Each structure stands twice: as C-alpha cells, then as structure tokens.
Image (cartoon, rainbow, N blue to C red):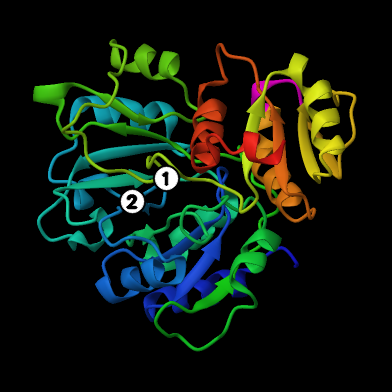
Amino acid sequence: MAEPTQADIQAAAALLEQGGLVAFPTETVYGLGADAENPAAVASIYAAKGRPANHPVIVHLAPEADPGYWAASVPAAARALIDAFWPGPLSLILPRAAHVPDAVSGGQPSIALRCPSHPVAQALLRAFRHGRGGVAAPSANTFGRVSPTSARHVLDEFGAPRPQVGHGVLNMVLDGGASAVGIESTILDLSRLDSAGPVLLRPGHIDTAQLAEVLGVVPHAPDAAAPRASGTLAAHYAPRTPLVLVAAAELPALQIRLAQAGRRVALIGRGRLADGPATASMVLPADAAGYAQGLYAALRAMDAAGAELILIETPPTGPGWRAVHDRLRRAAHDSAGILQKFL
C-alpha cells in the first residue's frame, strides 16, 4: 500500500464522520478507529473485533485538542504528564465528562485519552471534525489476539476494506509503515487521585521511572477498585498457536525432545538463535526497545508457520523489559501447562 495522500486522509476523516471504521497507524500499534461521540460507530468497533461491551477503548486526540472537553476534570498531574509525554505512547484515565457517551468507557465514569505521535494518525485526527473530534481506537485485530503493527496485519485480520459504511465493517486502512514502538501505550489511572493516587494499569514504552520523575511519586499497582482498561485481561495479545516461555539454557534440550516426539515447533529467540531443530524461527533484537518493536510481527509470523507450539526464549528482567514481560505473560496465559501434552 502506498503512503496516504492528503486526499486519502480527507476520505478517511469523512468516513469517520459518516460512522465508518478506519484502521490507522500509531507509533504503538494500528488502531481500529470510529467517532468517539457516535455510540453506533463505537458499537461497530466492538462488533468488528468481537470485543466485550464492558471493555473500554482509548479516545485518540489531535495535538491541539482540549482534553478538558472529554474529561470532567484535568488535574495538574495530568497536565504535567501531557506536557512531558504527548504526543506519545501514554494514555491517561480521567473522570469522564457528562456529555461524552459511555460507549467508549464500557459504562464506567472514566475515560482514557491519548495523543499519538505518528504523523499519519495526527493528520487524520486534525482532519476529523477540524481537529476537535476524538477517535475511539483499540488495536485493529480481533479481540484478545496479537495486535497489528503494519497495514498488512490489519488486512490479514479483517480482509479487504469495503467502502459502504455498515455495522462492524472495516471501510479503510491507512498505511503508515511499521509501528515504531510496537506495543501498546502505557495506561495511567488519574481518575482517583484523592483516594488512590496515580495507578499504573498497563506498562508500556514510557516506564515507571519516567512517570515518577514528572509526578514526584512512583505510580501504585492496580487495586480492586481500579477502572477496567484496554489490554489488561489475564489472557490477551495471544497467537492462535499455543505459546510457552522457556529459559535460554533449557531451549536446546527441549527442542530436541519435542522433535523426537514428532512435534512441529516455532522458535523466537533474542539476539541469537539457540541450537536445536525448529519448523520456523526468528531472532529479535537483544535490546528491550528493539525487541518490543518486533515482537508482534514475530508472533504473527510464527503463528502462520504451521507449527504446533511456539517457544519463546524468556527475555531478561530489569529496566525497559516490564512491558514486554507483561505482553508475553498475557499471551501465554491460556497455554499454561500445555507443554507436557506435547512431550
């Protein structure tokens, strides 16, 4: 697909205004967008993805948009974080303004807002309702599966777009190349500052230390009263092929045992490939940022390789790796205990 022209951007904005669905690139992953103030359009997102109705989505804003239109209040902490990290991969949960439909928040009294830095996303957001609208956009994939980091991934999920606006129908895909960050935004809850303080609901490219430097306090872990947020279910980001994390030292012997059992195995390594038989394999960069950028594309490629099992060399812990571990833990959740069935 060619890089979007200004005519493409205007056509996409017009589709959004008509209640259509447009997939567009952000620096994190590709989003499946609809007019955030049109409940029927937002319902189309849920229908296309097979997403539970009580699972909220994030509203994307142009750089010049006023978060105060969407939030009942924008505390000083939120303003400081906006100044520090917007446009960028940080979503803030704030009390939802009364006039904003609750379709985007899964019926909760809060709303998640983000301003993406990708130039195509910004062009679309500026064109949509002259930059004063909001685009509700979860990742452009079926619910619970691996997020897309290219336009090709979106087409693999939903097929060719159809021009006629209809319930749950993808109408257009804007191609902005491969997503630079590759995993979803950091989500920080600021809707309960008086009672709970800032709460980190989902780790991402912007890490806890960066948030703490602006806030003056380290964000807390989620409590039982924390709002529901995108991508925080126990099982998420999962390929269809079962996935198991394995320590690097254990990989070669495990691959041999699986090969002796006649199993087809795909392997994702870090920095280098472990020795051992594999139906397919990929190597991701050794650094956390590079690894995150390539992770979802690797999962999709190995999912399509015809293997019965995906083995992933467990990444290191430490600074920069928390978000990667979060995504892999959720991706592997439904495969717990499955390895013994293959041996």
The crowding category of the residue bearing disc 2, from other C-alpha atoms within 10 Å (few below 14, some 14 to 19, many at least 20), is: some
Residue 248 is situated, as x and y percent measured from the top left of the image, at 75, 18
Q: For this view, does 306 lie left or right of residue 25? A: right
Q: For this view, does 74 lie left or right of residue 252? A: left
- Residue placed most toward the observer, 254 or 166: 254
Residue 100 is situated, as x and y percent measured from the top left of the image, at 18, 60
Residue 124 is situated, as x and y percent measured from the top left of the image, at 50, 62
The crowding category of the residue bearing disc 1, from other C-alpha atoms within 10 Å (few below 14, some 14 to 19, many at least 20), is: many
Q: How many marks?
A: 2
Q: Is residue 200 above or below residue 155?
A: above
Q: Is residue 271 visible?
A: no
Q: Residue at x 26, y 66 (%)?
A: 37
Q: Residue at x 30, y 16 (%)?
A: 215
Q: Residue at x 77, y 23 (%)?
A: 251
Q: Is residue 57 visible?
A: yes
Q: Disc 2 marks which amino acid?
A: Ala
As drawn, the label of residue 127 is: none
For discs 2 and 1, the disc positioned in front in the rendered view: 1
Which range is magenta? 285-289
Q: Which residue is mark 2?
A: 65
Q: For this view, does 267 lie left or right of residue 222? A: right
Task: Point out the image quarter for the N terminus.
Answer: bottom right
* Contact, mark 2 vs mark 1 (Cβ under 8 Å): yes
Q: Quadrant of residue 267?
A: top right
Q: Is residue 313 above or below residue 9?
A: above
- Residue placed most toward the observer, 196 or 214: 196
Q: Residue at x 37, y 78 (%)?
A: 19
As drawn, the label of residue 115 is: 1
